[in-house]
Image: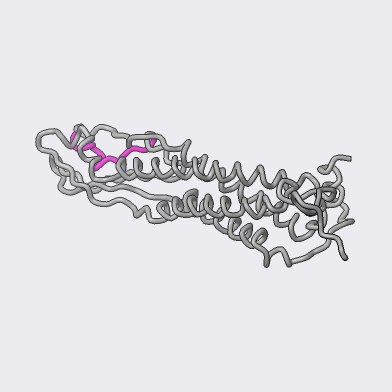
Amino acid sequence: KTPAIYLYRNLLHGLDFHLDLSPLREPLGFIKILEWISSIFVFATCGGYKGATTILVSCKGLVNRTVTAAFAYPFRLNQVTFSSPDPTRCNGTWSEFHLVGNFSSSAQFFVTLAVLMFLYCIVALVLYLGYMHIYRSGGIFPIIDYVFTLGAVFLWLVSSAAWAKALVDIKVSTGPRIVEEIPACKLSGSSCVFASVTSMGSLNVSVVFGLLNMILWAGNAWFVYKETSLHKPSGNSPTSGLYPPASGI
C-alpha cells in the first residue's frame, strides 16, 4: 500500500485518528495557523474590493457634472467606461471612454494562490492534529510537506511582486492623470477636473499580507525540514564521528 492510500483509509474510517493539540504549541503547527489566517486576509482584502473614480465635466449647458467609472476585482479596467454627463452626451461631444489596462491575470493569480494556500493549511492542520504519529513515522509526508512549502515561498514571492506592480498601475490608471487621456475633455468649451477615487488601502494591505505570507512560509520551511528524513539521522547511522566511543576501564 502506498502512503497516500494508507492515509486516505485512515481519514475515511477514523481508525488511527488521535486528536492532539500539542503541535499548535510547536512552531510547526503555530506558524501553520498564522499562514491560514494570513491567506484569509489576502483574498478578503483583494478579492472583495470595489471602487470608482470620479471626474467633474463641464461642457455646453453643463457645469461640474459628475461622471463615474466603477471598477472591482479582477480589475479588467479596459472593460470599464465612464458614465455620460447627461442624456445628450454634452450635445454629442462626449464620447465613450474606457479606463486603461487589464490587470486580471496578476489579481487572479494572487487571490487563487491565497485560496489554495488556505485549503492546504486546513489539510496540513488536520494531519498535524490528528495524524502526527503517521506524519512523524519516517514516511513520505514530511518530504511532500517540505517540497510544497518551498514551492509556496516561491509562488508567494512571484505573485506578491506581480500584484504590487499591478496595483501601482491601477492607481495610475484611475488617478488624476486620467483626465489628460479623455478626448472630450480636450475640446474647446469643455473641461474636466479629477474629483476622487475610492481609497485603495485594503489593496495595499493585501500586498503586505502577501509578503507576510512569503516570510511565514519561508520561516516554516526550516521546521518542516526538521521533520524530514533529510534532517533526521537514520537509525543505523553511527552515533559518533571519526572516533569510536570511549570504552570503560
Q: Which residues are magenta?
A: 79-92
User: Hey, which residue is sitting farthest front in the picture?
Assistant: 249
Left or right relative to 69: residue 16: right
User: Hey, which residue is sitting farthest left in the picture?
Assistant: 189
- Return the x and y of residue 179 as percentages of the image width and height: 22, 40
In the rendered view, tell whether residue 90 sits above or below residue 54: above
91 inside magenta stretch? yes
Left or right relative to 204: residue 243: right
- The image quadrant where one finds the N terminus is top right
User: Quarter of the image holding residue 176?
Assistant: top left
The residue at 73%/49% (across/down) is: 228
- Return the x and y of residue 147 as percentages of the image width and height: 66, 42
- The image quadrant where one finds the C terminus is bottom right
- Residue situated in front as seen by the camera: 92 or 22: 22
Left or right relative to 27: residue 50: left
- Residue situated in front as seen by the camera: 16 or 154: 154
How many numbered discs sit on the rendered protein?
0
- Return the x and y of residue 183 as percentages of the image width and height: 20, 32
- Residue situated in front as seen by the camera: 132 or 198: 132
Image coloring type: one colour
In the rendered view, tell whether residue 30 sits above or below residue 119: below
Magenta portion: prevailing SS class: loop
15 inside magenta stretch? no
- Residue situated in front as seen by the camera: 144 or 6: 144
The residue at 86%/56% (across/down) is: 14
User: Quarter of the image holding residue 172?
Assistant: top left
- Return the x and y of residue 135 as percentages of the image width and height: 78, 53
The residue at 42%/41% (across/down) is: 75
